[in-house]
Image (spheres, grey):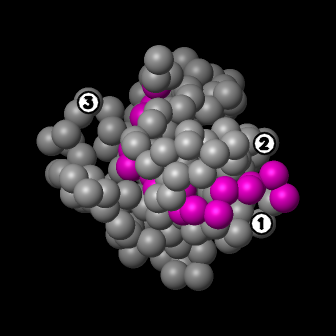
Amino acid sequence: MNIILAPKTYVDAQTFNKFSVYGFNSNVGSSPEQVSDLNGVPAASFQAKEDRELLMETDWAQRTDIPISLEYYMDSAQSAQKISLQLAYSFDGAAFVWLNAEVIETPPDTAIHTIALSNPISVSAIPAGDGHTLRIKIRRVGSSEVDTHSGNFCLTAVKYYRAV
């Protein structure tokens, strides 16, 4: 297992429900690079024009839709650009289900921002019973023609709730 971001102990010490910053990808060819911002906040850097993905895992017991929010920054300031992101999920080791890719309008700066993905993981996808392992993958679809930002998408946190 190739750890990409901060270990769970670091994340738990930061804020509630940001444990998914503990990410990994065993395939170096599709893995984002480990970076940090000027304040030392760890991030997974998804390069432009490439398809890169990061896998995160947590315990899950709630019986509601699972909205996903991302904290990120772009490593270069560019106006009127977009990136393409895709989310996949799996419960208890089952095959991953990929949701539709979403086009995100990037801010014209390099500050940390929060976005809420439009498609939650539906409650109907959660298996019956308690105590499941939820795995999600975040992919930048850099090969898509709608992904026009030439800078890196730097993911700092994934939250399993709707950020406002």
Callout 3 touching callout 2 (CB < 8 Å): no
Query: Is 155 part of what is drawn in magenta?
Result: yes
| Of callouts 2 and 1, the N-terminal one | 2
From where the camera sits, is residue 76 visible?
A: yes
Q: Badge 1: how crowded within 10 Å, few (<14), some, or many (20+)?
A: some
C-alpha span from label 1 to label 3? 34 Å
Q: Which residue is mark 2?
A: 100
C-alpha span from label 2 to label 1? 15 Å
Residue at 45% x, 36% y: name it. Answer: 113
Amino acid carrying label 1: it is: Ser
C-alpha span from label 3 to label 2? 28 Å
Determine whether the residue tagged by mark 1 lies in a helix, strand or loop.
loop
Residue at 53% x, 72% y: name it. Answer: 31
Start-end of magenta stretch: 145-161
Residue 86 spot, x, y in % from top left: 68, 48
Q: Which mark is residue 143?
A: 1
Amino acid carrying label 3: it is: Phe
Amino acid carrying label 2: it is: Asn
Q: Badge 2: how crowded within 10 Å, few (<14), some, or many (20+)?
A: few
Q: Which residue is mark 3?
A: 16
